[in-house]
Image (spheres, grey):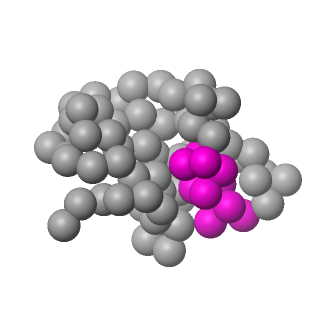
């Protein structure tokens, strides 16, 4: 299995990242959402956001759109 960086956005306007071991990027986002308390989330800082969502990041730190899970608002 590989380690993936999963971004968590919460309505408290805080971005955080955790390393999630999973067989693929999509599963990493799903695991992060379903068991977020099992991961060590490092704070990235504030953003304007009003929901709770998870998405896996690629090696550049860009979101992999197909891995979005949870509610991203809108």
Give the residue at x 75% y 45%: 21
Residue lying furthest bottom: 66
Q: Is residue 40 left or right of residue 8?
A: right
Residue 28 visible here: yes
In depth, the one of 43 and 73 nearer the eye is 73
Q: Would residue 30 be counted in the magenta stretch? A: yes
In the image, 23 versus 33, the foreground residue is 33
Looking at the rendered image, the quarter that the C terminus falls into is: bottom left
Front-most of 54 and 37? 37
Q: Residue 38, percent across and down?
A: 66, 30
Residue at screen point 62% across, 66% down: 26
Asked if residue 60 can be seen in this view, the reply is no
Please provide the residue range marked out in magenta.
24-34
Q: How far from the left and from the top, in percent, is residue 65?
A: 44, 71
The spot of residue 56 in percent (x, y) is: 53, 56
In this picture, is 6 found above or below 45?
Answer: below
Kindly report the secondary structure that dominates the magenta region of the rendered protein: helix
Outermost left residue: 48
Q: Residue at x 35, y 48 (%)?
A: 52
Say whether residue 16 is magenta: no
Across and down, in percent, residue 4 comes to: 64, 49
């Amino acid at each position: 299995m590989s380690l993936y960086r999963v971004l968590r956005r919460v309505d408290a306007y805080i971005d955080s990242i955790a390393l999630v071991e999973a067989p693929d990027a999509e599963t990493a986002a799903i695991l992060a959402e379903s068991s977020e308390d099992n991961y060590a989330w490092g704070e990235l800082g504030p953003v304007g956001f009003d929901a709770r969502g998870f998405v896996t990041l690629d090696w550049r730190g860009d979101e992999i759109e197909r891995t979005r899970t949870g509610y991203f608002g809108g």
